[in-house]
Image (spheres, rainbow, N blue to C red):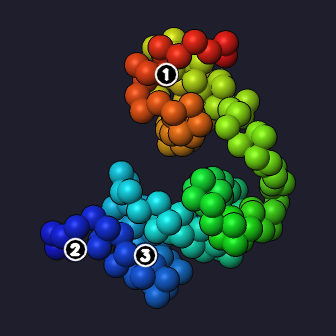
Amino acid sequence: MGEGPPIGAAVVEHGRALLAADSDAEAHFQRALAAHTGSPRLPNRARTHLAFAEHLRLARRRVDAREHLRTALALFEGLGATSWAQRAAQELRASGESVRHRDVATATELTPQERQVAALVRQGLSNRDVAAQLFVSSRTVDFHLRNCYAKLGVTSRAQLTALPLDL
């Protein structure tokens, strides 16, 4: 693929994934998600996660689909895209996982996993070290850390460490 804006590459790869044979679709979805990294176009990223997860679930790879479904659900909820969030939640339930419904009162509270990640990051551990300690992937740690940042209104590890939190 030639040089161009990452969002253009992401859209093209997403489209190719939807049109590709099952054996080729995953590579296109992976390239689309890589192009979405750091993009401010969260709705596009969320839709790519959802489409990839649907593809994985239909390929009977339910466990692999769940990470993408959780990411899509969190992004859609954060954007207030209710119908898309419902679709992601429905897919997550179809993958065999129960979906926790959030209410307005708990929307800014950290989940137990987010608390663990934040506490370990505040101790100075890298994402890789946090992942090893919690037996999850570095991407999962990054996902929870981004949620912590959004909920706590910070943009860096230094700001997270400076917060007077009892984690």
Q: Quadrant of residue 71?
A: bottom right
Up the image or down, 76 lies above or below 4; here it is above
**Residue hosting label 2:** 1
**Residue hosting label 3:** 14
- Residue pictured at 29% horizontal, 71% vertical: 9
Q: Nearer the viewer, residue 21 or 102?
A: 102
As measured in the structure, the alpha-carbon distance from the residue carrying label 1 to the one carrying label 3 is: 34 Å
Up the image or down, 38 lies above or below 91; here it is above
Q: Nearer the viewer, residue 31 or 83?
A: 83
Which SS class for mark 1? helix
Q: Position of residue 67 (x, y in %)?
A: 62, 53
Which SS class for mark 2? loop
Q: Quadrant of the C terminus?
A: top right
Q: Residues within 10 Å of mark 2 (few under 14, many from 20)?
A: few
**Residue hosting label 1:** 160
Q: Position of residue 143 (x, y in %)?
A: 54, 42
- Residue pictured at 47% horizontal, 60% vertical: 42
